[in-house]
Image (cartoon, helix red, strand yellow):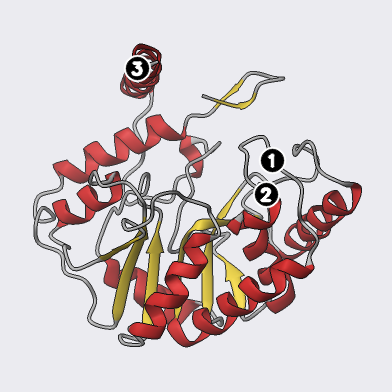
Amino acid sequence: MFVDRKRYQLNLGPAICLLLEKQLRRQKGLKGQLQKPADLDIVLCTTRAKKQYTEKVLEYLGIDDFIVLGRNLESWKHIYKLELIVDHIKRNPHPGLLLHLDAPDVIVTGDLQAAVDSFLSEFECDLLFGAEKNSAPGSKTISGVTDSEVEFLARIEAFEEATYQAPLQHLNAGCFIGRKECILKLFSEALHTRKQFQLNSRLSSGGRLCDDDQAILRELHRSHYPRIQIDHQNRVFQNLYATERSEISADHPVPGGIRFLMAYVRYLMFIGSSKIKRWLRK
């Protein structure tokens, strides 16, 4: 709900997403009409049996030939995403490009061929991640970790902030596109070298820092730039967390005024009902 509780800065991203989804469904000619690019493999990861938000969005657009990894797992650690994708590429080296989308919360707003074309023509890299405003995990916001772990994160942050122009300077691991050969090599390296980083502290979520895929991938990006880059200008990916309406790179502007307010109220009602359901299940 909040980006910064100390200043009570609201996270408007969910309301923006609701409005973008409404615009998507109003566009005639999109429902059921899009196809997966022939040279692209689309991968999502989740352990949940229930169909996730991103799956529903893709199917609405007519794209049903995507892969969902992880539904055979009984529990989840974020680092499993790297392991699942490495195993998938070993078994399926073709087609040559892979697009990963977080299963619970990614909206696709147009033809994915445009994303492929942009990656191939506008970026001189083999792997491109989305970008976000916040450093997560952040050296100034994480708690219960050692001084050396804080230094590890601070070094990553300093590199990202020196390499990319604000406000979107930090790697977000939820969405990425890249060449499978590169992803296989670099993810395999990350799974091997992460044990050498000495990131053993337990986070508030219960997992260990060394199992945080975003922390590991941010260090991989630092050590392999420019072969790995982030999309800080929103040419392929647009992160919505802590984002303002004016910062959205979309084909149509996000409405403001009463329409935006109503979308945010809908989000608050959803949060409230979810908390009530969890309370009743206890």
What residue occupies the far front of the structure in this picture? 74
- Could you say where residue 101 lies in the image, as x and y percent from the top left? 38, 58
Q: Where is residue 31 in the image (x, y as percent from the top left)?
A: 10, 53
Residue underneath mark 3: 281
Res 203 label:
1
What amino acid does circle 1 point to?
Leu
For marks 3 and 1, the one nearer the N-term is 1
> Disc 3 or disc 1, which is closer to the eye?
3
Query: In the rendered structure, which amino acid carries the disc numbered 3?
Result: Arg
Q: Residue at the spot x=15%, y=64% of the render?
A: 34
Left or right: 82, with 199 as reference point: left
Where on the picture, by quarter, is residue 45? bottom left
Mark 3 or mark 2, which is nearer the start of the sequence? 2
- Secondary element at tag 2: loop
Mark 3 to mark 1 CA distance (whole Å): 26 Å
Q: In which quarter of the image is the C terminus?
A: top left
**Pointers 2 and 3 in contact (C-beta within 8 Å):** no
Amino acid type for the residue under numbered disc 2: Arg
The span from disc 1 to disc 2 (Cα, nearest Å) is 6 Å
Q: Residues within 10 Å of mark 3 (few under 14, many from 20)?
A: few
Q: Which of marks 1 and 2 is nearer the N terminus?
A: 1
Q: Do the residues labelled 1 and 2 touch (CB within 8 Å)?
A: yes
In the shown orientation, is residue 78 left or right of residue 36? right
For image coordinates 24% across by 64% down, the residue present is: 111
Place of residue 95 in the rendered image (x, y in percent of width and height, measured from the top left) = 30, 85
Can you give x and y, in whole percent of width and height, for residue 169 in the image?
66, 55
Q: Distance between the residues labelled 2 and 3?
A: 28 Å
Identity of the residue drawn at 21% across and 71% down: 36
> Residue at point 47% right, 50% down?
76
Q: Is disc 1 placed on a helix, strand or loop?
A: loop
| Of 265 and 194, the residue lying toward us | 194
The residue to which callout 2 is attached is 208
